[in-house]
Image (cartoon, rainbow, N blue to C red):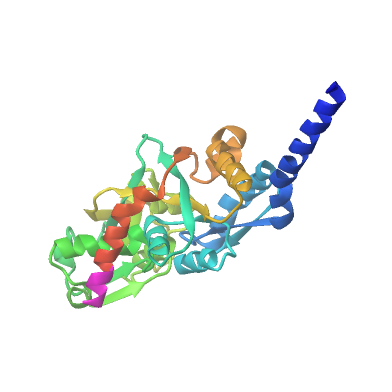
């Protein structure tokens, strides 16, 4: 005769291993590393992402350590080596990671305040300069961000190619500044005459955030405002940056990471708003396939560089 106790014992035998398996990842992953590329200076990245990493620790149930990478390539190499579990990529750097076989998967993307999922690459000049278009900049100095930056390198080269321009011969010098902020500073202080940068809207860009913090000064030390810069070229729309995690992570851990990001705007509104000064809507799911066009862009630009 099968008693109630017998049934409960059987259920317990089945359920206990399942529960144990679900908790196994906590022993294997006592720490999760979140890496962010330095699109801003390290202090600004820490101010934005430090509180968010603390939220992730609470939401996921294990320690999340923020690692500010030296450059975009360091994020790629960190995930390739398995030392970075979750990464905040730029579209081009994620495309390059996929191109070299890094086992990582995009799982969410930020939505702009207007509901769009993209941004632009722009060329800034100083408003007091005589330059009104790229045609006026022949023989001048161009500032780019990083070879793995979409808006600061890949898209600018693509846009210039459409105009029949080879940067290495058209400009007097091409300066790689290392970050979007550095590019703006190089322009403000006269190191370059034009710089590439990311731009969403007049009140949503690296330039706008830098000006809001009093970070933009010319060579004399005078503060500059947004009105002191002029856009002379704007690219086609670029898909927003993805958040990606290692493909080999245990499924229960992946689910927690995914839920923590997708529900951040509701569960940690202050920390979430701090990432974009309140300019972004909640993250939404995204897939690797949505970056296939970016891979084509990167391959095209790589071909230009090799040529």
Query: Main structural element of the magenta stretch: helix, strand or loop?
Result: helix
Q: Residue sitting at 38 percent across and 52 percent down?
A: 225
Residues rendered magenta in the picture? 302-307
The answer to whether any part of residue 167 appears in the image is yes
**Residue 124: percent from left, percent from top:** 29, 58
As displayed, is residue 173 above or below residue 277?
below
As displayed, is residue 46 above or below residue 272?
below
* The stretch drawn in magenta includes residue 103: no
**Residue 281: percent from left, percent from top:** 46, 36
Place residue 176 in its image quadrant.
bottom left
Q: Residue sitting at 48 percent across and 40 percent down?
A: 283
Considering the image in quadrants, where does the N terminus appear? Answer: top right
Residue 261 lies left or right of residue 212; in this view the side is right
Residue 146 lies left or right of residue 56; in this view the side is left
Q: Residue sitting at 83 percent across and 32 percent down?
A: 9
Considering the image in quadrants, where does the C terminus appear? Answer: bottom left
Q: Nearer the viewer, residue 202 or 258?
A: 258
Q: Nearer the viewer, residue 207 or 122?
A: 122
The answer to whether any part of residue 130 appears in the image is no
Residue 162 lies left or right of residue 191; in this view the side is left
Q: Residue sitting at 18 percent across and 77 percent down?
A: 169
């Amino acid at each position: 005769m099968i008693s109630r106790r017998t049934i409960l014992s059987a259920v317990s035998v089945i359920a206990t291993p399942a529960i144990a398996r679900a908790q196994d990842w906590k022993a294997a992953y006592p720490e999760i590393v979140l890496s962010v590329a330095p699109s801003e200076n390290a202090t600004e990245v820490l101010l934005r992402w430090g509180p968010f990493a603390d939220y992730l620790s609470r939401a996921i149930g294990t320690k999340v350590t923020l690692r500010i990478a030296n450059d975009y390539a360091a994020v790629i190499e960190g995930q390739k080596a398995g030392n970075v579990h979750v990464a905040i990529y730029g579209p081009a750097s994620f495309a390059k990671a996929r191109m070299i076989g890094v086992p990582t998967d995009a799982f969410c993307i930020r939505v702009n305040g207007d509901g769009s999922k993209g941004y632009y690459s722009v060329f800034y000049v100083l408003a007091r300069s005589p330059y009104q278009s790229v045609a006026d900049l022949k023989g001048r100095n161009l500032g780019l961000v990083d070879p793995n930056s979409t808006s600061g390198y890949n898209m600018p080269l693509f846009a210039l190619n459409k105009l029949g321009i080879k940067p290495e011969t058209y400009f007097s010098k091409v300066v790689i500044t290392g970050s979007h902020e550095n590019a703006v500073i190089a322009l403000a202080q006269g190191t370059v005459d034009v710089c590439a940068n990311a731009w969403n809207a007049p009140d949503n860009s690296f330039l706008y955030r830098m000006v809001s913090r009093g970070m933009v000064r010319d060579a004399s030390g005078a503060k500059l405002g947004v009105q002191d810069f002029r856009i002379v070229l704007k690219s086609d729309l670029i898909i927003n940056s993805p958040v990606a995690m290692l493909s080999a992570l245990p499924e229960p851990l992946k689910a927690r990471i995914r839920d923590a990001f997708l529900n951040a705007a509701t569960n940690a509104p202050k920390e979430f708003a701090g990432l974009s000064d309140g300019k972004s809507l909640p993250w939404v799911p995204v897939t690797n396939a949505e970056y296939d066009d970016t891979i084509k862009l990167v391959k095209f630009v790589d071909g230009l560089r090799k040529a």
